[in-house]
Image: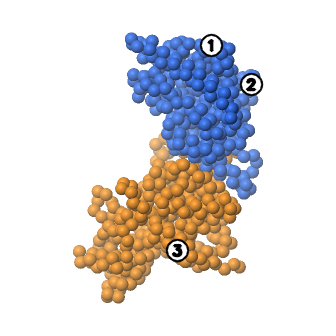
């Protein structure tokens, strides 16, 4: 039995290596900062024969996802990646992917959206796709990006819902970190070949996404809504089995740190949540019982796991790297409050928006923000 | 000589009982396309009349696996499917012969919103046939102008007649250096059939545009679809040609118009038979407007005659 290999690698290259390990068939791609290096790496792997797949260099992100969903409907395992305005440009096709029940997996390397231009990370892009019917993971390390892409294929193909794997531009995408690569036979055991129940097959002519009457349309929508909720046990099972096979664990629907006895709980996603572990340690040294709850899954929102994980009477400090325009504060806070209402009246929720357009979020800054929020 | 209509295969891929209008040229054309392609094919459709007429879920009036896709993306989605079936075949996950991947798209989905993705698919020379059934307007949404609408046409968004000529989309596709481009129309079914058979056996991007006179949008009598199609060709308003590897050849009767053996019929009769033109020709500038329509046709004939001489 082969041993795992440990290398130093960037987040984008870790994503490309996961795509290779997943034995993906078709990858449509288009460049956009900071995602571009995923596509460059995949194009190279296909060109030199490392990955037996088709890379389709299309002319824009709308076409990226239009090619991806169609290839998926034909029965292929499909991956792609984008960022920011590329994701916004795909918006219409995001709905087609979920409504069409096509298990595409896509990385979104989080970046603030135009206008004005910014190159750096915030979470407006992925959170703005909340209502498109995709499952959304948010990752806080290069290793988690690699692991999550493989888990995402498992979940997507199990329930026929597309999955978006989000991680921050630059802090994750362009930074070198240690990366453990499990042996290929272990990954093959975890992720068997894609065998879709249904595909575009001339031996079995059938129509796909054609006009429906209202009652059928409503049924399709209801099924999608039900199945997104039903994916939570699959997300947990995928994380658990991945751990059993590879020994690696990033949390399942949520990830926690020093949470059990916490009175003050930081609540955030992506790379800032990794940095927040250090802020929690600093606060603990100052005598504050602080902890971290990171939703690894943003959609479906892990309501039950959050409700059962939050310690009694905790103050939850939601650190949002996005705006919920028309509401005070950010989107995560709004989501959290809505699920706590009537279920956990002992919890206080406080909220700050920070790190917009890639403003650096250091452990000291976030620790001092949490302290200041305690006095509000 | 084109295959005689009597010699077309019996196979029917357009099944009886669908929602098309009587005399629908797109459905007639698709029937002939089906005879040429046979059942081993995958069909893509963007929003258009052929979607509206194929039947409501779960019914299907076309005997192929059919996927409805986003309006702008016939080119890219067909690329996705063609690459998917090819790689799955390479990996032994598909048995038998590779299916033909074809898009069946109106002029809006080709000339306008679908142009970018189609141009890119052509530049990549991905293996597919893109059919444009061109009824020279957005007929399915109630007849609005498109890039394929000729000058002088009444549509609901050009209530005093379109002021600009249509663009030459087949020629634009040819300038992508793709292996096969052809034009056709329903009055010449053998010509269309032969072109589809030819396209089916060529690797890479194939583009076939079919003029589809729509009685509703063009405002003529329902039984006159084929007659209108023939008049379009005889007047030179529609030229039948094909280009293999960039070399343009005109087909009968357009070849006789191009070579000068036969005069194109004056456009007057063709125009006056159609409500989309003649309702605008009651004013004092009628003669000038007919002259503009005739001028656009004469220019295209002259231009294509010269363009066909370039064989580099």
Q: Which residue is mark 3?
A: A176
What mark, if any, has residue B3 been given in the picture? 2
Q: Are both tags, 1 and 3, on one chain?
A: no
Q: Are both tags, 2 and 1, on one chain?
A: yes
Report the chain shown in blue: B
* Residue B233 higher or lower than B94, as above or below: above
Kind of element beneath mark 1: loop
What's the chain of the residue with tag 3? A
What mark, if any, has residue B138 been given in the picture? none
Q: Which residue is mark 1?
A: B263
Q: Which numbered disc, 2 or 1, marks the residue that appears first in the sequence?
A: 2
* Residue A194 higher or lower than B269, as above or below: below
Question: Between marks 2 and 1, how big is the CA–CA gap?
Answer: 25 Å
Image position of A339 (left or right of A91): left
Give the percent coordinates (x, y) of residue A98: 51, 53
What's the chain of the residue with tag 2? B
Quadrant of the image occupied by residue B59? top right
* Residue B8 higher or lower than A356, as above or below: above
Tag 2 near tag 3, CB within 8 Å: no
Give the percent coordinates (x, y) of residue A257: 43, 80
Image position of B65 (left or right of A256): right
Which shade of the palette goes to chain A? orange
The residue sitting at 59% across, 32% down in the picture is: B171
The residue sitting at 61% across, 52% down in the picture is: A56
Image position of A249 (left or right of A316): right
Question: Between marks 2 and 3, how big is the CA–CA gap?
Answer: 65 Å
Q: Are both tags, 2 and 3, on one chain?
A: no
Kind of element beneath mark 3: loop
Q: Residues within 10 Å of mark 3 (few under 14, many from 20)?
A: some
What's the chain of the residue with tag 1? B
The residue sitting at 48% across, 51% down in the picture is: A90
The C terminus of chain A: image quadrant = bottom left
């Amino acid at each position: 039995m082969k041993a795992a290999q440990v290398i130093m690698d960037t987040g984008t290259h870790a994503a490309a290596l996961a795509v290779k390990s997943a034995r993906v068939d078709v990858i449509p791609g288009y460049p956009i900062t900071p995602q571009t290096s995923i596509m460059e790496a995949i194009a190279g792997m296909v060109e030199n024969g490392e990955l037996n797949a088709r890379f389709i260099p299309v002319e824009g992100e709308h076409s990226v996802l239009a090619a991806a969903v169609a290839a998926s409907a034909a029965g292929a395992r499909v991956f792609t990646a984008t960022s920011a305005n590329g994701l916004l440009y795909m918006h219409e096709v995001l709905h087609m992917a979920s409504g069409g029940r096509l298990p595409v997996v896509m990385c979104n390397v989080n970046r603030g959206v135009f206008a004005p231009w910014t190159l750096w990370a915030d979470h407006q892009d992925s959170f703005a796709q909340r209502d498109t019917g995709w499952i959304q993971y948010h990752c806080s390390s290069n290793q988690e990006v690699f692991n999550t892409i493989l888990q995402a294929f498992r979940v997507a193909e199990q329930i026929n819902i597309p999955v978006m794997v989000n991680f921050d531009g630059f802090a994750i995408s362009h930074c070198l970190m240690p990366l453990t690569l499990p042996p290929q036979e272990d990954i093959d055991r975890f992720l068997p070949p894609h065998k879709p129940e249904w595909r575009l097959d001339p031996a079995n002519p059938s129509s796909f996404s054609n006009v429906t009457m209202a009652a059928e349309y409503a049924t399709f929508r209801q099924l999608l809504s039900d199945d997104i909720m039903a994916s939570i046990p699959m997300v947990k099972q995928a994380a658990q089995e991945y751990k059993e096979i590879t020994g690696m664990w990033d949390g399942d629907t949520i990830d926690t740190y020093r949470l059990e006895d916490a009175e003050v709980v930081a609540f955030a996603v992506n790379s800032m949540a990794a940095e927040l572990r250090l802020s929690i340690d600093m606060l603990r040294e100052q005598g504050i019982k602080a902890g971290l709850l990171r939703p690894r899954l943003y959609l479906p929102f892990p309501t039950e796991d959050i409700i059962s994980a939050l310690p009694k009477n905790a103050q939850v400090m939601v650190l949002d790297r996005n705006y919920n325009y028309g509401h005070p504060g950010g989107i995560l806070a709004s989501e959290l409050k809505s699920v706590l209402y009537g279920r956990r009246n002992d919890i206080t929720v406080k909220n700050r928006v920070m790190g917009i357009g890639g403003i650096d979020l250091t452990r000291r800054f976030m620790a001092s923000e949490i302290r200041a929020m305690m006095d509000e | 000589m084109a295959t005689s209509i009597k010699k077309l295969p019996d196979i029917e891929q357009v099944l009886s009982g669908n929602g098309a209008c009587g005399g629908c040229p797109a459905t007639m054309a698709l029937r002939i396309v089906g005879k040429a392609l046979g059942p081993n094919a995958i069909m893509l459709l963007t929003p258009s009349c052929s979607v509206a007429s194929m039947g409501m879920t779960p019914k299907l009036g076309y005997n192929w696996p059919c996927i409805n896709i986003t309006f702008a993306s016939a080119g890219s989605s067909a690329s996705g499917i063609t690459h998917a079936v090819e790689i799955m075949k390479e990996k032994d996950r598909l048995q038998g012969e590779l299916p033909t991947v074809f898009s069946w798209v109106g002029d809006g989905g080709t000339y306008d919103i679908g142009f970018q993705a189609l141009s890119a698919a052509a530049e990549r020379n991905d293996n597919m046939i893109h059919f444009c059934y061109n009824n020279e307007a957005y007929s399915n949404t109630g007849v609005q102008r498109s890039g394929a609408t000729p000058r002088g046409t009444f549509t609901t968004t050009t209530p005093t007649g379109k002021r600009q000529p249509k663009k030459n989309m087949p020629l634009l596709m040819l300038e992508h250096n793709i292996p096969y481009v052809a034009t056709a129309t329903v009055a010449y079914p053998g010509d269309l059939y032969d072109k589809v058979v030819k396209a089916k056996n060529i690797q890479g991007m194939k583009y076939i545009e079919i003029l589809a006179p729509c009685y509703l949008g063009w405002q003529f009598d329902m039984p006159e679809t084929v007659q209108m199609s023939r008049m379009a060709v005889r007047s030179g308003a529609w030229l039948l040609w094909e280009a293999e590897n960039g070399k343009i050849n005109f087909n009968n009767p357009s070849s006789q118009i191009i070579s000068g053996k036969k005069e194109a019929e004056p456009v007057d009769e063709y125009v006056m038979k159609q409500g989309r033109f003649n309702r605008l020709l009651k004013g004092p500038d009628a003669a000038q407007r007919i002259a503009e329509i005739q001028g656009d046709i004469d220019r295209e004939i002259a231009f294509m005659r010269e363009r066909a001489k370039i064989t580099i």
